[in-house]
Amino acid sequence: MKQTKTKDHAAMAEAFIKDEERVDWHDGALWYIREKRDIASKKIPEWEQLREAASMIKNNVISNLHEYLLQFEANLKKNGITVHWAADAEEHNAIVYAILKAKEITQMVKSKSMLTEECQLNEYLEERGISVINSDLGEYIQQIDNEPPSHIVLPCIHKRKEEIGELFHKHLGTEKGLSDPTQLTRVARKHLRNEFLSRRVALTGVNFAVAETGEYVVCTNEGNADMGAHLSEVQIASMGIEKLIPQKNHLSVFLRLLARSATGQPITIYSSHYKKPREGQEMHLILVDAGRTRQLGRADFRDSLKCIKCGSCMNTCPVYRKSGGLSYQNTISGPIGAILAPNLDMKMHADLPFASTLCGSCSNVCPVKINIHEQLYKWRQVIVKEGYAANTKALGMKTMAWTLSSPNSFNTAGRAGRWVLQNIPFVVNNKLNPWYKQRDMPEGSGQSFAEWYQKNGENNKEDLK
Amino acid sequence: MTSREKILEAVLNNQPDLSPLPDISMFKGNHNNVVQKYMDVFRSIGGKTFLVENLDEVNALITEHFDINKRVITTLTDLSDRFELISATVDPHLYEDVELAIINAHFSVAENGAVWLTEDLMGQRIIPYICQHLAVVINAEKIVPTLHEAYDIIGLGNYGFGGFIGGPSKTADIEQALVLGAHGPLTMTVFILK
């Protein structure tokens, strides 16, 4: 069996936070997007009712998923789309490979799909001699840099334009030092246009799949999904089984919420409804489980399957903004990633639910009202109970529980702490104390409030009257 | 057991008790001033709009604003004496050098600027995505306030492919700097027939 090791979020973030200027810039860039979301949502008086409706529709989906899957499958077939089922990443990848192999095709173009990132499809296909090119600009940049996306909507949000210019210089032969976003985008446009024109297979993700009609909707701003799909002989769509919605008119609720929550746009530029293959084209759709049915069975965590992947919880999260998406070491990062990842591998991702201040901002912006911060708190309990918490955290929590359980131990601990801070601060102001990293310890006060009150409270009682 | 059976069984075992669907019929937009609202929103997302009396005006504006010496294609038979009619049957790759495509849309949506197109109006599915510039003609009375009215019109839909298009293609993947013209058209113009 594969030996997994718990990945420490703070350690993973270390490289990113070394550069303080970059952290501030990253923090500001994401907060700017959060503000755009606020402005867009405030223009819709019924915003909160829309969130409630979206949440209820998704609650219905997860409670009736079996029925909707059967209905969707039947309608897909009626529409002439071949349906595949994949229990896990490996099976998903094998299905894609078999489709390509049957046609003896060795090149594929792929638009944004977090599911295929999760399945590591590119790596799987490349090992078998198939070249895959990511057509979303951000994903393309991450691909040529050999890095996973750091944000589900903005894959290279952590990169500076100069770094992207350097990558383009190396891979696309642009002039050294070129870093103007418009010029770089034009170069990528030209390069990728040739790929769209020459590749015979296009794979897309799925934003929403309509059970009632057997069609699926793909949302992009760049037009890359459509450029790939409409020029292809074979079109493949990969989707997690939770992406279903019951009825066509439910799209009105979700499309009103999605782009406004994600980037503050009123709608993505392209919302494409794929229903039937065009003349002479083959269409395949792969329904993927890969841990989703397991999450469905976890009563405390199944609501995470309502996610529509807008990324707003990342943009608002103080920890995400200051640690960068790559520190989560999971395809879906940020608060939503931290409640999805432990389901996939509890040991490896045991640290993620702790990478949060539990401030609740994520839950407040979520367009489908997932109680993200409460689930983070619940995962912590599960992880400690299952014995996956890091030793320092488990020990710390045990000590805390003991300290808080009796007034005597609390008072003693408080006195000891203040004495240390006042008399021997070097004991805590050193590298051995993880809390001291990038923080200054406070000067200890002479007494606690309880001690002060005991001394002064009685004397001052008369004055307070 | 096949993966299909395994997944369906796990779903059936793990899904919670049925939770009812909400009523969404109360979501309705305001029809007042939708033409102006549409134009304001569409311009704010980088599109151009012209309110016109007839197709002659469209013709004149196209000559004025686009390079018509390059390849211009259309599905509008009224413009076919000047421009090439789109063929629904040729290889879509042959449209890679199109400068401007002029097509009709079913309707547009005031709250987000998007037009609704199905493949019959596109000529071919690839057309509104592969052209360098996209021009769309709509009737002013076909503008609806929100997506709720839009999906009332679309219904279940009898198309193979349909899409909302809300402006020129764009990206902000490089340092959040907005660039119009990612992979799709560099510009999008909507002519609104009064």
Image (cartoon, helix red, strand yellow):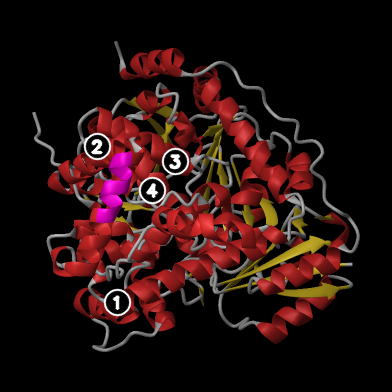
The circle on residue A281 is: 3
Establish if B6 lies above or below A287. above
- In the rendered image of this protein, does residue A286 appear above or below residue B89? above
Amino acid type, mark 4? Ser
**Is tag 2's residue or tag 4's residue first in the polypeptide sequence?**
4
- The image shows residue A12, relative to residue A376, as above or below, that is below
Residue assigned mark 4: A113
From mark 3 to mark 2, how far is it between C-alphas? 62 Å
Q: Quadrant of residue A380?
A: top left
Tell me which numbered mark, 4 or 3, is placed earlier along the sequence. 4
Q: Report the magenta stretch's main SS.
A: helix
Mark in the foreground, 3 or 2? 2
Both labels 1 and 2 in a single chain: yes
Estimate how packed mark 4 is, as few (under 14), some (14 to 19) or many (20 or more) residues with alpha carbons within 10 Å.
Answer: many
Magenta span contains residue A409: yes
Q: Is residue A463 magenta?
A: no
Give the residue at mark 2.
Answer: A398
| CB contact under 8 Å: marks 1 and 2 | no
